[in-house]
Image (cartoon, grey):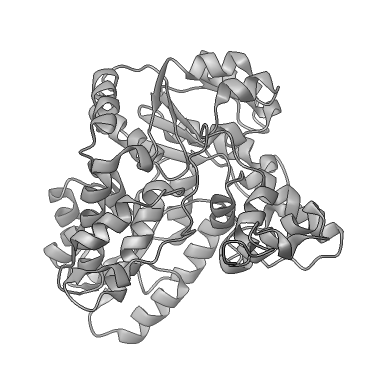
Amino acid sequence: MRLLIVGTLEGYITAAGKIALQKGAKVAHTDSIGGALNALRGGQGADLVMIDVKLDVGMLIEALKTERITVPVVACGVATDAQAAVKAIRAGAKEYIPLPPDAQLIAAVLEAVAEESHAIVSRDPSMGGVLRLADQIAPSDASVLITGESGTGKELMARYIHRKSRRANAVFVSVNCAAIPENLLESELFGHEKGAFTGAVARRVGKFEEANGGTLLLDEISEMDIRLQAKLLRAIQEREIDRVGGTQPVKVDIRVLATSNRFLEEEVRAGRFREDLFFRLNVVNLALPPLRERPADIAVLSQHFAAKYSEANGLPERTVGPEALAMLQGHRWRGNVRELENTMHRAVLLSRGTEIGTDAILLTGAEPAAPAPGYSAVAPVAARATAVAQPQTAAGDPGASGTAGLVGRSVADVERDLIIDTLSHCLGNRTHAANILGISIRTLRNKLKQYSDEGVAVPPPAGGELDRAAM
């Protein structure tokens, strides 16, 4: 855990730093927002920024968004300064910590930030075999390719490997190759010099340099443009990178992990992924089974999430009743662990007592879907549209085939309506919509750009999410 403290914290900076150090954090300090941005641009990195409310919290958060530096921010101030606390939260701060600092409160905030890297919760034998292999290869510096359907916990597995490695005390840096526009991903990975392109207001260290000495995760690497893959291959092989606009190569010492929800062998055959890069990454392959093939994990994870969200919402701990558990175990879980987590969060909020019953379990896509032949074999969106748009008819009814409401419409029209309706349901969030539809974020962007060009109204992106459909 790397903590960056910004400001004087009303003179309590030494106390706050000592508490964080006692909890295992590495603490750095700067007096100003400019100093904080320079530290983050320079590759110092941070897992959490703690800023004095006397500074402009909103300015810092907007600057981080503009420069695509992803780090949670918490504000600190004297306990009586309620207006400053409200202003900081509205500006985007995750939490407000009153001063003087309380050891338990700071420990809780640090724990909450680090929660996503905690141990994997699993009891199923199929997952046990994967964990044993991960334990065996973790101490090495070998590249690891982690594959599996969306929502199976690929990034969590990558963090697990890092914690078990010789680099556990060094930094873990993750970059989502699907969430960054192609024209900016090179700069995000390798950094840039001031003035290298429009918007490059200062020199910025990329993820490779930021991860120096530690582990770099290339999340959803199959979404990376093939032209950038050549530069990535050289960086991995030579352990040196070239900043955009730079003149001298920079040496880096990193371990590379990568994830993909596609069969990369198929991507190679289709010409969308370089074969040499695939072999460079695939020294070890960890294939995570989908949740429907891990029945023992459904029980343990559902109870884990029930306890987690009971505490998060200040409710008495909920337990999963036997009928509710049977209902959960009979579901197909196309969204895997992520879908189960959301289902249990809803169930905790809807449950009328301490035992979660079937009335609190709201499942998405209630019809049992046949398992996909492979996690890369994504069903066409139009095929999903048929299932979603089927009218409810009785057996023997002329419309019982479920396609009566679609007759006379083109496949393209049905596909467009499904995409737009799903995006509206997700409040414009492109990433969530792509996961629900079972398509890549790149495919969704291309579809939305096509619809916009055709004059179709496309829901605007969710707050904080760039509209990359037009990029």
Q: Is residue 410 left or right of residue 177?
A: right
Q: Which quarter of the picture shows residue 355?
A: bottom left
Q: Is residue 471 left or right of residue 392?
A: right
Above or below, 395 against 188 in this view is below
Q: Which of the two residues, 256 or 331, is positioned nearer the viewer here?
A: 331
Q: Quadrant of the N terminus?
A: top left
Q: Which quarter of the picture shows residue 65?
A: bottom right
Q: How many marks?
A: 0
Q: Which of the two residues, 247 or 107, is positioned nearer the viewer here?
A: 107
Q: Position of residue 170 (x, y in %)?
A: 30, 32
Residue at 20%, 74% in the rendered image: 314
Q: Which quarter of the picture shows residue 105?
A: bottom left
Q: Is residue 363 left or right of residue 180?
A: left
Residue at 56%, 39% in the rendered image: 177
Residue at 26%, 65% in the rendered image: 309
Above or below, 432 against 24 in this view is below
Above or below, 87 against 162 in this view is below
Q: Position of residue 119 (x, y in %)?
A: 22, 41
Q: Position of residue 275 (x, y in %)?
A: 61, 15
- Visible residue check, residue 462: yes
Q: Which of the two residues, 336 or 159, is positioned nearer the viewer here?
A: 336
- Visible residue check, residue 249: no
Q: Is residue 255 left or right of residue 431?
A: left
Q: Position of residue 290 (x, y in %)?
A: 40, 38
Q: Residue furthest front?
A: 396
Residue at 28%, 42% in the rendered image: 295
